[in-house]
């Protein structure tokens, strides 16, 4: 099987979401690493410590996101520039509670829950852990939910992914990022 994931030269660029939060870091040029394949049809990228893995399964996609924080983590798909027009999944783990939310990028630096925009929350939470300063969340979402606030994901086609995480302990859907980056992947 050929490499499905592509890390383009533009992968080293950060999101244009403003500067990092105090004490946070922004992605540096050359920080993206080559993707590593997982067993089966899974693909994975590691970008400045943020790991994103995905596996198309029938009419849905299984996604795992993991980052070096005890705060929130997020991944967005089909960005039109920063967060704009991206289908965003944001979540956090607090003890035994795992929360995720289906969001849509309403502007370059803003996002809102699909449900507040007249859409639906189409995510299925699979698992979430917070161990050794790292948050990991696995979820399933439809490749094409039919929701105007979700972007259609097509296996084998390119997709601009935006990745971000919050400061340690920032368990929220609205906190400012400590780190953010973007990269091109192939679903």
Image (tube, rainbow, N blue to C red):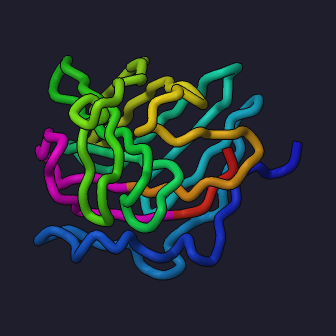
Q: Where 122 falls versus 41 (above or below)?
A: above
Residue sitting at 34 percent across and 63 percent down?
180
Chain part drawn in magenta: 164-182
Task: Please state the horizontal and vertical placement of residue 63, each as a whole percent of the image.
Answer: 52, 33
Give the farthest residue toward the right: 1
Determine the residue positioned at 52% across, 42% down: 151
Q: Which residue is pictured at 31% across the width and 42% down the height? A: 134
**Residue 181 located within the stretch drawn in magenta:** yes
Residue 126 seen in this snapshot: yes
Task: Give percent across and percent down for residue 100.
Answer: 29, 29
Residue 184 is situated, as x and y percent measured from the top left of the image, at 60, 61
Q: Nearer the viewer, residue 159 or 148?
A: 148
Residue 125 lies, in percent from the top left, at 38, 20
The residue closer to the viewer here, 165 or 184, is 184
Q: Indicate yes or no whether the magenta region holds residue 56.
A: no
Name the image quarter holding residue 10: bottom right
* Above/below status of 186 relative to 31: above
Quadrant of the rendered structure where residue 153 is?
top right
Question: Residue 101: in sight, yes or no?
Answer: no
Could you tell me which quadrant the C terminus lies in?
top right
């Amino acid at each position: 099987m050929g490499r499905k994931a592509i890390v383009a030269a533009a992968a080293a660029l950060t999101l244009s979401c403003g500067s990092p939060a105090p004490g946070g870091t922004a992605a540096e040029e050359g920080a993206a690493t080559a993707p590593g394949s997982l067993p089966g049809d899974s693909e994975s990228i590691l970008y400045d410590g943020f790991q994103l893995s995905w596996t198309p399964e029938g009419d849905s996609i299984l996604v795992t996101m993991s980052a070096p924080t005890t705060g929130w983590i997020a991944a967005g798909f089909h960005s039109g520039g920063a967060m704009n027009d991206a289908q965003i999944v944001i979540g956090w783990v607090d003890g035994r509670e795992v929360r995720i939310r289906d969001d849509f990028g309403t502007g370059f630096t803003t996002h809102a829950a699909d449900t507040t925009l007249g859409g639906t929350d189409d995510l299925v939470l699979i698992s979430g852990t917070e161990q050794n300063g790292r948050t990991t969340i696995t979820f399933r979402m439809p490749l094409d939910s039919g929701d105007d606030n979700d972007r259609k994901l097509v296996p084998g086609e390119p997709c601009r992914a935006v990745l971000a995480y919050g400061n340690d302990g920032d368990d929220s859907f609205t906190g400012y990022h400590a780190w953010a980056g973007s990269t091109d992947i192939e679903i």
